[in-house]
Amino acid sequence: MQNVYKIILLFFCVMSFSALKAQSALNPDSVIYRKSWEAGFRLRSDGFGLGAEFTRAKRFKRSLLFQVQFAYFRHPKQVRQQSPFGGGGLFGSDGFKPYVYGKQNTLFTLYAGVGQKFLLAEKGKRHGVQIFFKYAGGFSLGILKPYLLEVVDTSSITGNTFANTVTLGYEPNNPNSLFLDHDLIAGAAGFGKGWKLKILPALHAEIGMEFDWAKNESFIKALEIGVAADFYFKKVPVMVQNNKFLYPSVYAGFMLGRRKER
């Protein structure tokens, strides 16, 4: 995976150099759009997200870029598994949900940043694809929501059955906690429980390409691809183990929007 990141990064470096050279090539029939907005979703190698972008033209082929994004983070070590006390689909026969063993928090990120967007290739007069190169960076807020499990209430065990479960979160200072006991985990507690949120600041950076194939130049219908990274100032406690400061990812997304001449 590291070699993939290096190859993609080299590709985008070449594209950025091409973008700078392309500034001098101006089609005299081109319409100069001063502003644009677009919004859409991304599938990432570590989750998915929703976002929006706004641009203000500095030159015909270079614009100031503003970004906002909200994303769900999926740790590379998390594996979803079925409840041993009833299985199948989202709910088992006893209503127990699949769960992720060793996960202590769910992470969402809220990002805002600025950058630049370069037009590499214009569309043909009747059809074609408009190609952009862009980069941006800024600040993120990591929002941690406790991940809770339904665990067998040992006081309700009778023979090979049990009557009740208790809801538990990870307690690092409690060696007797049943949160990591494979044999007693009934399933996930559900997203509606555990809203004691924590905030972690981070830095975000990304570079990417955008391919717009909308027939009308004032509209945007585009596919985007790129690489991104979030750097936190301490290890992010998503899992009980294998947490890091830096989380790189690759992404692909779909955007819809509009350009304005003024």
Image (spheres, grey):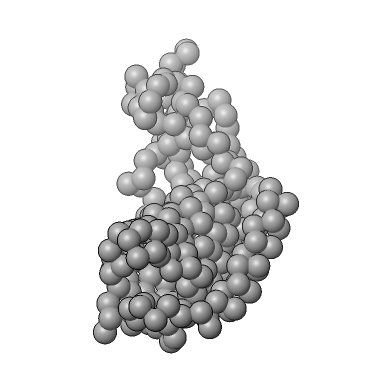
Along the line of sight, which residue is nearer the eye, 14 or 90?
A: 14
User: Can you tell which quarter of the image residue 155 is in?
Assistant: top left
Establish if 198 lies above or below 17. above
At a point 43% along the width and 55% down the height, the residue shown is 223
Residue 245 spot, x, y in % from top left: 64, 62
At a point 65% along the width and 61% down the height, the residue shown is 11
Residue 152 visible (yes or no): no
Residue 144 spot, x, y in % from top left: 47, 58
Establish if 30 lies above or below 98. below
Residue 20 visible (yes or no): yes
Along the line of sight, which residue is nearer the eye, 201 or 36?
A: 36
User: Can you tell which quarter of the image residue 178 is in?
Assistant: top right
* Image quarter hosting the C terminus: bottom left
At a point 54% along the width and 44% down the height, the residue shown is 103
Residue 39 spot, x, y in % from top left: 33, 63
Along the line of sight, which residue is nearer the eye, 236 or 196?
A: 236
User: Can you tell which quarter of the image residue 6 is in?
Assistant: bottom right
- List the single residue furthest toward the bottom: 58
**224 left or right, relative to 240:** left
Establish if 99 lies above or below 200. above
**87 left or right, relative to 5:** left
- List the single residue furthest toward the top: 159
At a point 39% along the width and 64% down the height, the residue shown is 124
Establish if 172 lies above or below 15. above
Residue 203 spot, x, y in % from top left: 56, 71
Q: How many marks?
A: 0
